[in-house]
Image (cartoon, grey):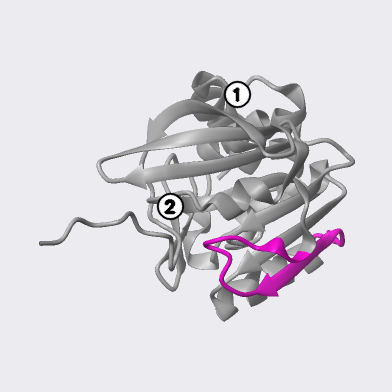
Amino acid sequence: MDLEQTRFNMIAQQIRPWSVLDDNVLDLLYKIHREEFVLPANRSMAFVDMEIPLGHGQVMLTPKMEARMLQELHVKKTDKILEVGSGSGYLTALLASQGVHVYSVEIVPELKAMAENNLQVHHITNVTIEQGDAAQGWSKYEPYDVIVLTASTPVLPDAFQKSLAPGGRLFAIVGEDPVMDAQLITCIAPGEYSMKKLFETSTAPLINAQQPARFTF
């Protein structure tokens, strides 16, 4: 396999057609090699338009989804970032390359170890990975300039937008199958937020994600 040609094809055929045209994001996809953040047995799948199993019931999002997240969040070099769900550390690495520091929270101990190892191998040091359950918020290092949830949530807890600094952006996939909305929430001023629906999609929920109230007789 010609990795660089395959990477080029991924960007040209999957990512650009999904309206990801930001040169900074595209350059980053060439710089940080996705195939180095998957399980060895799944290396050949790294460039395919699909979610890749990471073990423990968790997946790496599709290439176009990760790229679109980055583009929509407009991460700046001064941004303090909260990532909910470290996974293999790939999106963590992309975020760390754009912002000043990433606080990433992973509930699965084995994935926390995997992400830490991958980041160490790639000499990415502006990341703090903690084991914990951030499905309903993680106020420890707030306020954040950027928050990204790497899996869906049926209901978006208010705690996330309350953890945003003024001007901060939050990316979340909200809802339940068959249709979920990718949303970008921006803190316009303290206690004031705007929400933009970006596109419809579907992906597995966060472990312990907040559930909607169910009507019972």
Relative horizontal placement of residue 54, taking residue 6 as reference (left or right): left
Quarter holding residue 167: top right
Q: Which residue is mark 1?
A: 20
Which of the two residues, 9 or 190, is positioned nearer the viewer here? Answer: 190
Q: Which residues are magenta?
A: 122-140
- At 47% from the left edge and 35% from the top edge, which residue is drawn? 182
Q: Position of residue 206 (x, y in %)?
A: 45, 60
Callout 1, which amino acid? Val
Placement of 170 over or under 53, stated as above or below: above
Relative horizontal placement of residue 130, taking residue 197 as reference (left or right): right
Q: Position of residue 86 (x, y in %)?
A: 62, 62
Is residue 132 found inside the magenta-colored segment of the image?
yes
Q: Which residue is mark 2?
A: 153
Relative horizontal placement of residue 100, taking residue 2 as reference (left or right): right
Callout 2, which amino acid? Thr
Which of the two residues, 61 or 146, is positioned nearer the viewer here? Answer: 146
Q: Position of residue 7 (x, y in %)?
A: 61, 37
Tally of numbered discs: 2
Can you say which quadrant of the picture contains the N terminus?
Answer: top right
Nearer the observer: mark 2 or 1; the answer is: 2
